[in-house]
Each structure stands twice: as structure tokens, then as C-alpha cells.
Image (tube, grey):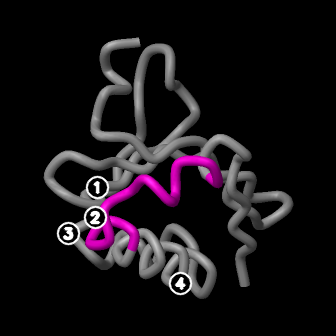
Amino acid sequence: MWEVFEHRNVVKKIPKIPDEVLKRYEKWKDIVGISGLDGLSLIKGFHDETLKGKWLGYRSSRLSLHYRIIYKIEEKQLYVMVIDINPHDYKKR
């Protein structure tokens, strides 16, 4: 069992996220909580991938055409830290 933690900035953004994206985020959390990265990789719609450059060490999953979730896995502690949910602007930083 994995624990999913949300950064305080993510908690503030949740009320502003469209309902459809929020539902996919909740499903994403369920999948990660139960089976971690292995379960997430079985669902191609999330298009989970490692990030490069400034975001090296982080991963991204697709929640919709525009929204992505950025997170980091700490395997030794079996937890996932959700860093951000955004409309795909992380490549501009």
C-alpha cells in the first residue's frame, strides 16, 4: 500500500480544477495507493513518464488533454508526493 501526500499548493488548487479532471485525479490516487507505479503503468491513458531538465527526478501523468500531475516517488518510504496539478505549463519553467 502506498501513501499519497499532496503539497499544500495542490490542496489550494483542487477547488479550482474542473470536475472531470478532479475525478481522474481521484482515480489516479486510488490506483497509485493500491499498486504504485506498476498499476499506473498498466493504464495507458495516464501516459505516465519521467521528466527531464529542471524536473529531473519527478514524473508526470496525464489527467486530461491539458492537465498534468507532477509527482515524486520515494520508494524507501512507499509514498508519493504530489507536487502540482496544472494545465501543462511545467515545460515553460
Is 16 covered by the magenta stretch? Answer: yes
User: Residue 9 location, x and y as percent?
Assistant: 65, 41
What is the distance, in whole Å, between disc 3 and disc 4 at their CAs? 15 Å
Which residue type carries mark 1? Arg
Q: Residue 72 carries which label?
A: none
The tag earlier along the polypeptide, 2 or 4, is 4
**Could you say whether the residue bearing mark 4 is in a helix, strand or loop?**
helix
Q: Position of residue 67 (x, y in %)?
A: 28, 49
Q: Give the distance between the C-alpha atoms of the residues marked 1 and 4, in whole angstroms.
A: 15 Å
Label 2 residue SS? helix
Q: What residue type is labelled 3?
A: Gly
Q: Which residue lies furthest to the right in this view?
A: 77
> In the rendered image of this protein, does residue 26 appear above or below residue 54?
below
Left or right: 5 as drawn, with respect to 32: right
Quadrant (top left, top right, bottom left, bottom right) of the C terminus: top left
In magenta, the rendered stretch is: 11-22
- The correct choice, above or below, for 32 with respect to 59 in the image is below
Instruction: From the image, tell me which residue sits under label 4.
Output: 30
Which residue is tagged 3? 45
Residue at the location (77% across, 67% down)? 78
Per the image, label 1 sits on a secondary structure element best described as strand
Q: Which residue is denoted by mark 1 in the rendering?
A: 62
- Residue 46 numbered tag: 2
Asked if disc 2 and disc 3 are in contact, CB closer than 8 Å, the reply is yes
Q: In which quarter of the image is residue 63?
A: bottom left
| Residue shown at the point (64%, 54%) measured from the top left | 11
